[in-house]
Image (cartoon, grey):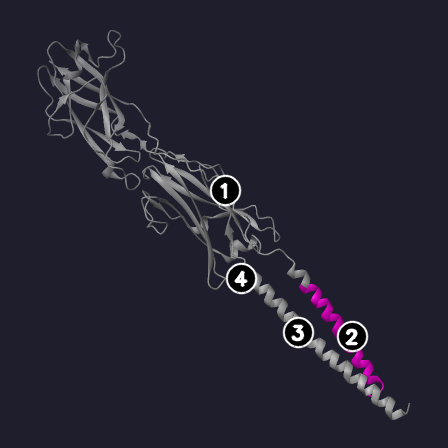
C-alpha cells in the first residue's frame, strides 16, 4: 500500500472516531438531561398523603375516644394524631408542607369555621408535633396537635380535621383526613354562697326580702335548671329525712322555707325532695361568663314555738333543663 | 497534529465518551427501577365511630349550703 493511501485511511479512521465521539457526547448530554427530567417528575408525583388513621384521644398518642366528657369549669386537652407519608421522605414534610387543622362541632358546615370555644377550635399549625421520622430514608411520620376543650363546648358530634398541602407543587397538591367523636353532655354547677343567712327574725314574721343564691353553669348544657331541696342539719336523729330546721328550742318544718326564681316573684314552699327551681342558666360562651350565673331566692317564715338559733341545709343539684 | 496520531486521539476520546455514556445509561436504569412514589395503602384503624347520642353526666352533686337564722325574742 502506498504512503498516500495509508495516510488517507488513517484520516478516514480519525474522522470516523471523531464522529463516534460526537454522537456519544450528544447521547451523553441527552441521557443526563433525561435523568434530571425523570427526577423532577418523581417529585411532582409525590405529595404527602395521610394514612387515614386519625385518632382523637385524651392522652398524648392515646387510643381513640368515641365519647368525651368535658371537665367541669376547666379545659380538657384532646390529642389528635395520625400518620402521614411522603415518598420523598418524612423529613421533607416539616419543611415543605403547610397544614390546616381544626376541631369543630358538626352543627357547623365545615372546617373553615370561625374560632369559637363553644363550637370551633382552630389550633395553630405551629403547635403540631412530629415524631417517628427516623431519617432521610423513612417516609412516614406521626403528627399530633392538641385541642384545649372548654367545659362549655357543645354537646354534639365533633369532627377533627387535618389537611396537608405541598406548596412546592404546581398546582399545589394536598390531602385531608378527618374523624369524629362525641362530646358528651355535662350537667355541672357551682354555688357561689357557702351559707345562707336570714339574720335575726321574729316569731310569726316572714323575712322581708328574698335571700339570693347564685348558681353557675359549669357544664355545657344550655338552660340548666337546678334541683333544690332542704335536708335537716346534722344531728337530727329522730327524722333525718324531713328537712326540718333544728332550733335551740323546737323545730321548724321544711315548708317554713319558700323559694322563687325571682326576688319579687311568687314563693312556693320548699320540699325535702329535689325540686326544679324553674330558672334557666345559660351555657357559658367564654370561660367564667357572668351571663351563665343565675340567682334563685328563698324566704323564711318563723312559726310559733321556736327559739334560739336554727339551722338547715339547702342541697342544690345540677338537675336538668 | 500529525496524521498518525489524529485517529488514535479521536478513537481514545470516542472510547471515553462511549464508556461514560454506558455508565450514565446504567445509572439511569438503576434510578428508574426505584419504587414508584405512591402513598401507602390506607389503614382504617380507629375509624369505628360510636353511634348514638351524648352521654349525660351529673357532677358536683349535691352541693350543701348551710342556712341559719336567729330567733329574736
Q: Does the CB distance between marks 1 and 4 fall below 8 Å?
A: no
Estimate the x, y position of residue A77 in percent, counting from the top left: 42, 39
Name the chain letter of the residue that bears numbered label 1.
B
Disc 2 designates what residue?
B15
Disc 1 designates what residue?
B44
Q: Is residue B33 visible?
A: yes
Disc 3 designates what residue?
A29
Marked residue nearer the N-terminal end (2 or 1):
2
Disc 4 designates what residue?
A44
Find residue A308 and report its image quarter.
top left
Find residue B66 and report its image quarter.
top left
Q: CA distance from mark 1 to mark 4?
A: 27 Å
Find residue B57 and report its image quarter.
top left
Q: Does the CB distance between marks 3 and 1 fall below 8 Å?
A: no
Residue A40's label in the rendered image is: none
- Closer mark to the observer between disc 3 and disc 1: 1
Estimate the x, y position of residue A68 in percent, counting from the top left: 39, 35
Amino acid at each position: 500500500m502506498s504512503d498516500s493511501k495509508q495516510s488517507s485511511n488513517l484520516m478516514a479512521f480519525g474522522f470516523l472516531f471523531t464522529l463516534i465521539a460526537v454522537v456519544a457526547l450528544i447521547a451523553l448530554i441527552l441521557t443526563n438531561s433525561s435523568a434530571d427530567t425523570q427526577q423532577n417528575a418523581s417529585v411532582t408525583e409525590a405529595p404527602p398523603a395521610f394514612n387515614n388513621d386519625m385518632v382523637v384521644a385524651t392522652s398524648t398518642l392515646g387510643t381513640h375516644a368515641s365519647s368525651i366528657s368535658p371537665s367541669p369549669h376547666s379545659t380538657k386537652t384532646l390529642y389528635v394524631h395520625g400518620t402521614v407519608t411522603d415518598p420523598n421522605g418524612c423529613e421533607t414534610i416539616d419543611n415543605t408542607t403547610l397544614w390546616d387543622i381544626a376541631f369543630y362541632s358538626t352543627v357547623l358546615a365545615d372546617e373553615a369555621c370561625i374560632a369559637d370555644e363553644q363550637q370551633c377550635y382552630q389550633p395553630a399549625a405551629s403547635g403540631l408535633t412530629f415524631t417517628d421520622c427516623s431519617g432521610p430514608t423513612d417516609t412516614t411520620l406521626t403528627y399530633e396537635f392538641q385541642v384545649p376543650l372548654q367545659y362549655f363546648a357543645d354537646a354534639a358530634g365533633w369532627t377533627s380535621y387535618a389537611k396537608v398541602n405541598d406548596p412546592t407543587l404546581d398546582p399545589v397538591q394536598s390531602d385531608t383526613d378527618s374523624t369524629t367523636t362525641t362530646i358528651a353532655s355535662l350537667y355541672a354547677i357551682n354555688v357561689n354562697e357557702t351559707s345562707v343567712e336570714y339574720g335575726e327574725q321574729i316569731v310569726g314574721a316572714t323575712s322581708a326580702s328574698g335571700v339570693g343564691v347564685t348558681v353557675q353553669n359549669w357544664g355545657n348544657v344550655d338552660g340548666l335548671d337546678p334541683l333544690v331541696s332542704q335536708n335537716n342539719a346534722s344531728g337530727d336523729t329522730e327524722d333525718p329525712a324531713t328537712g326540718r330546721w333544728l332550733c335551740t328550742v323546737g323545730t321548724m318544718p321544711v315548708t317554713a322555707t319558700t323559694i322563687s326564681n325571682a326576688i319579687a316573684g311568687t314563693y312556693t314552699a320548699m320540699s325535702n325532695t329535689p325540686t326544679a327551681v324553674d330558672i334557666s342558666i345559660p351555657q357559658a360562651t367564654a370561660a367564667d361568663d357572668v351571663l351563665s350565673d343565675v340567682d334563685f331566692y328563698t324566704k323564711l317564715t318563723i312559726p310559733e314555738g321556736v327559739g334560739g338559733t336554727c339551722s338547715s341545709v339547702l342541697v342544690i343539684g345540677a338537675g336538668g333543663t | 497534529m500529525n496524521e498518525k496520531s489524529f485517529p488514535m486521539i479521536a478513537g481514545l476520546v470516542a472510547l471515553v465518551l462511549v464508556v461514560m455514556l454506558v455508565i450514565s445509561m446504567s445509572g439511569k436504569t438503576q434510578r428508574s427501577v426505584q419504587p414508584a412514589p405512591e402513598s401507602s395503602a390506607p389503614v382504617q384503624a380507629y375509624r369505628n365511630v360510636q353511634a348514638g347520642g351524648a352521654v349525660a353526666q351529673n357532677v358536683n352533686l349535691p352541693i350543701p349550703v348551710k342556712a341559719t337564722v336567729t330567733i329574736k325574742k
